[in-house]
Image (cartoon, grey):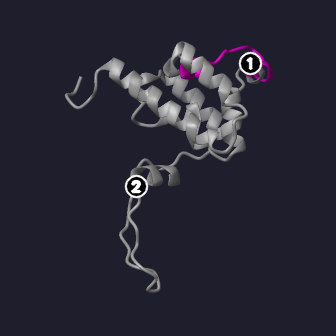
Amino acid sequence: MPDDTPAYPERIAAFQDRVLAALAEVQRYTRAGVQPTLERIQRSGALRVAKDHLTTIDTDSTEYSRFLNQPCQYFWTAKRVGRLDLSLEAIALDPAWRSLFTDRELAAAEQRLREHGQRRKSSRLIILRCGPIFGHGQAQPLTKIQIASKL
């Protein structure tokens, strides 16, 4: 394991913090649909909940498979408020957390997001400095939270 990679329990704790921050952000828009996922996370942990939601069940019938592999209520809530980037699926696909999931779980996350119209955003971030616009004061630097919310 590289020196800059935290120990596995620390990565799981960091993942949980990331998921809880996403749930808190979605709760800013609505309370409906967040509480059941929050309660499951409190009981089982964010990684277990995310893995459970990304586990797919294969059947001979495509329609039956789609029925069995429906997104969780939190996914629908994030979609309703226009923040699929805060779904468990999108978080699992983040390069920082991909190693916590199997290829099959990641494929399920990608497929679900694709089916619901979410395009993967580039992991590269380019920030340009700009001066005042039309002489109306100084341009303010963005904080990390503001930058993350604009992605």
Q: Position of residue 56 (x, y in %)?
A: 63, 18
Q: Is residue 39 visible?
A: yes
Q: Position of residue 111 (x, y in %)?
A: 62, 33
Relative vertical location of residue 78 with respect to residue 40 in this rendering, above or below: below
Q: Who's the residue at 38% across and 64% down the image?
A: 141
Relative vertical location of residue 38 with respect to residue 59 in this rendering, above or below: below
- For the residue labelled by badge 1, is the local secondary structure a helix, a strand or a loop? helix
Look at label 2 and name its amino acid: Thr
Q: Is 117 left, or right, of 49 in this rendering?
A: right
Look at label 1 and name its amino acid: Leu
For the residues marked 2 and 1, what is the alpha-carbon distance in whole angstroms? 41 Å
Q: Which residues are magenta?
A: 49-65
- Quadrant assignment for the N terminus: top left
Q: Who's the residue at 56% across and 20% down the image?
A: 41
Q: Is residue 92 visible?
A: no
Q: Position of residue 95 (x, y in %)?
A: 41, 36
Label located before the other in sequence (2 or 1) = 1
Residue position for label 2: 143
Q: Quadrant of residue 22?
A: top right
Q: Which circle marks residue 16 in the picture? A: none
Say whether residue 46 is magenta: no
